[in-house]
Image (cartoon, rainbow, N blue to C red):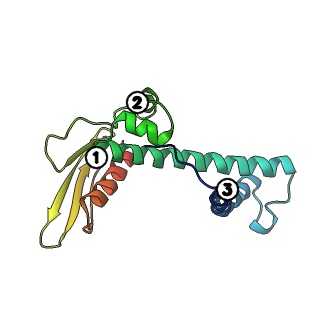
């Protein structure tokens, strides 16, 4: 896989979308920190306001890392190697192994099972509902499953992987 690049126009659109998404979070963080009503929450020392925005970006960064780990684990569950994960992220195979340890799993004992984040999930084809469902037990012992069927095995596996990541 080659390195992913975006055009300047795409980068500008991405920056705008991220700023639009960040504004409500930054406002909530600032409001809680200042203890002021929403209409007055930005009335403060400019450094304090900027630090509130920085705090909001930290929260976004943590969520991006969490979602990235889920994407890496999903790719690994479908047979992607650390070399492929590294290429997609622009790092070496060794760097990918260090960044996402244990996401490249050995082949599952059963064709419809996943082992991720210390938990397990079973993917089940529902002939009557014409869809895929999943049941899982996370590493923390929490059980879960799909309330509705998914049109593809891959989509069911992605949801199961997200559940396992959330209960690691």
| Residue that label 1 marks | 78
User: Looking at the rendering, which quadrant does residue 11 occupy?
Assistant: bottom right
Query: Is 118 drawn above or below residue 49 in the view shown?
Result: above
The residue carrying pointer 1 sits among few (fewer than 14), some (14 to 19) or many (20 or more) residues within 10 Å by Cα, namely: some
At which x and y percent is residue 61? 59, 46
Query: Is 6 drawn above or below residue 73 in the view shown?
Result: below
For the point 28% across and 42% down, the residue is 79
Whichever of callouts 3 and 2 sits on the residue coming sooner in the sequence is 3
At which x and y percent is residue 142? 30, 48
The residues bearing labels 1 and 3 have C-alpha atoms spaced at a distance of: 33 Å
| Residue that label 3 marks | 8
Q: Nearer the viewer, mark 3 or mark 2?
A: 3
Q: Secondary structure at mark 1?
A: loop
- Residue furthest out toward the front: 2
State how many labels appear. Answer: 3
The residues bearing labels 3 and 2 have C-alpha atoms spaced at a distance of: 31 Å
The residue carrying pointer 2 sits among few (fewer than 14), some (14 to 19) or many (20 or more) residues within 10 Å by Cα, namely: some
At which x and y percent is residue 113? 19, 47
Any part of residue 141 in sight = no
Badge 1 vs badge 2, beta-carbon distance below 8 Å? no
For the point 73% across and 50% down, the residue is 52
| Residue that label 2 marks | 97
Q: Along the horizontal axis of the image, is 80 left or right of 99?
A: left
Whichever of callouts 1 and 3 sits on the residue coming sooner in the sequence is 3
Q: Nearer the viewer, mark 1 or mark 3?
A: 3
Q: Quadrant of the C terminus?
A: top left
Q: Quadrant of the N terminus?
A: top left
Q: Along the horizontal axis of the image, is 154 left or right of 111?
A: right
Q: Secondary structure at mark 3?
A: helix
For the point 70% across and 56% down, the residue is 32
Q: Secondary structure at mark 2?
A: helix
At which x and y percent is residue 116? 30, 41
């Amino acid at each position: 896989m080659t390195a992913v690049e975006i055009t300047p126009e795409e980068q500008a659109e991405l920056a705008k979308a991220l700023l639009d998404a960040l504004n409500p979070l930054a406002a909530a963080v600032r409001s809680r920190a200042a203890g002021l009503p929403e209409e007055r929450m930005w009335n403060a020392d400019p450094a304090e306001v900027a630090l509130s925005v920085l705090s909001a970006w930290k929260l976004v960064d943590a969520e991006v890392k969490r979602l990235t780990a889920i994407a890496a684990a999903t790719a690994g569950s479908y047979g992607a190697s650390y070399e492929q994960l590294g290429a997609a992220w622009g790092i070496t195979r060794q760097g990918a192994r260090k960044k996402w340890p244990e996401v490249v799993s050995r082949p599952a004992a059963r064709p419809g099972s996943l082992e991720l984040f210390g938990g397990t999930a079973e993917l089940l084809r529902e002939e009557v509902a014409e869809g895929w469902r999943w049941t899982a037990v996370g590493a923390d012992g929490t059980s879960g499953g799909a309330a509705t069927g998914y049109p593809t095995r891959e989509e069911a596996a992605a949801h199961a992987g997200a559940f396992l990541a959330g209960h690691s």
